[in-house]
Amino acid sequence: METIIIKINNQEQDLELLEKAGKVLQDGGLVAFPTETVYGIGANALDPKAIVKIYEAKGRPSDNPLIVHIAKEADLEKYVTSVSPAARKLIEAFWPGPLTLVFEKQDCIPMETSGRLSTVAIRMPAHEIARKIIELSGVPVAAPSANVSGRPSPTQAKHVIEDLSGRVDMIVDGGDAEIGLESTVLDVTGHIPMILRPGGVTKEMLEAIVGEVEIDPAILNHQEVKVHLTPKAPGMKYKHYAPKGKMTVVVGDEDKVREFISTNAMKSLEAGRRVGIIATAHHIEFFEAALKDKNVMIQNIGREHHAKEIASNLFKVLRLMDEHKMEEIYTFDFSTEHIGMATMNRLMKAAGNNVVNVNE
Ligand code: TXA
Ligand code: MG
């Protein structure tokens, strides 16, 4: 399939291009487009044939449900059976934005979209280009992240082109995704809302609006997931976001972590392997000095304590590791404050929970 790539600089001037994207969706095609979280690969959520194409293009397991994206709040009622007062308050506070809500679904949402669940996940994105395309398509748009299944989610159009060129009808380039991590997924079907996937809207932010919020226990303790607990969001059980190299998260006292990483990086180098290091700005000079003139890729993920900056760079850095064919990747762990919880959730998954604690 030939993929048309269009670049949107200015929404008003480029309206015709956006109309084309909307038309492709309306006609049952696939369009990748930017959102404020990550790029998505969209199709008409009401058309099973179009939805099947998404699963094929991504190589995604068919039991993993899709998020339905809408352009205006009034559309919600068409797809869900009821909206609780708590859900209403959350919508008022966080839509449009990086919060996906899980409701009981209406029959018009096909099983292909909901992964055979009785529920459906709905989100109204804040990104103007995303909302415009959805509005112009005239249909609700199911859109998972626009990566091949298992790879880091795309935060730039070039990531989408790498993964999906030839597999989708159109890719809309609208610049970098600002947040860089996927939306928070919150189940509002029960008595107490439950976070199924952490994201840009944090537990504290949700609790400020509706009081108590739970977190799916299966996503908290990564060791336990393998043994007992199955996450409630089907997508959270798969290995995900992983770069191709073997990744190790090194935790413990800062000095010991530095020591461990530089010593092991040297060993790996001597064994002829390609090595990458991921650290905050604050550690970069240390590694540049410790590994001077060595062929090690040292990646700055952002400033220490700047949780948003670190979150927005994570997937880009993971993809860079692949681009440079790194075989071994060492990374610090990062603060779990605010969006940091989502960052660490993705980082641990990317590393397949491979953690070394240098204090032990
Ligand atoms: O930020 C985002 O949410 C991006 C952009 C494109 O909007 N989309 C995204 O979609 O991350 P995806 O398909 O990569 O992840 C959707 C997650 C998966 O973990 C899936 O299992 C979960 O949401 N999910 C979807 N519908 C669900 C449902 N009815 N119940 C529980 N989990 C659900
Ligand atoms: Mg995804």
Image: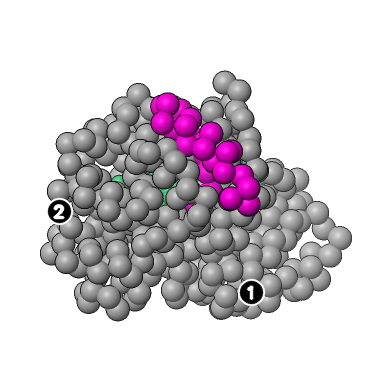
Picture quarter containing residue 177?
A: bottom right
Q: Residue furthest right?
A: 293
- Residue mark closest to the camera, 2 vs 1: 2
Q: Is residue 22 on the magenta stretch?
A: yes
Question: Dot 1: few (<14), some (14–19), or many (≥20) neighbours within 10 Å?
Answer: some
Residue drawn 31% across the image and 41% down it: 65
Q: CA distance from mark 2 to mark 1?
A: 43 Å
Q: Is residue 309 above or below residue 324?
A: below
Percent x, y for residue 135? 41, 45
Percent position (x, y) of residue 360?
48, 72
Dot 2 or dot 1, earlier in sequence: 2
Query: Helix, strand, or loop for circle 1?
Result: loop
Q: Is residue 54 left or right of residue 230?
A: right
Give whichever of 234, 253 is nearer the camera. 234
**Residue highlighted by disc 1:** 303
Q: Position of residue 181 (x, y in %)?
A: 49, 57
**Bounds of the magenta span?**
10-35
Circle on res. 82: 2
Q: What amino acid is found at the position of numbered circle 2 in the picture?
A: Ser
**Residue at 47% in and 37% down:** 22
Q: Residue at x 16, y 62 (%)?
A: 84
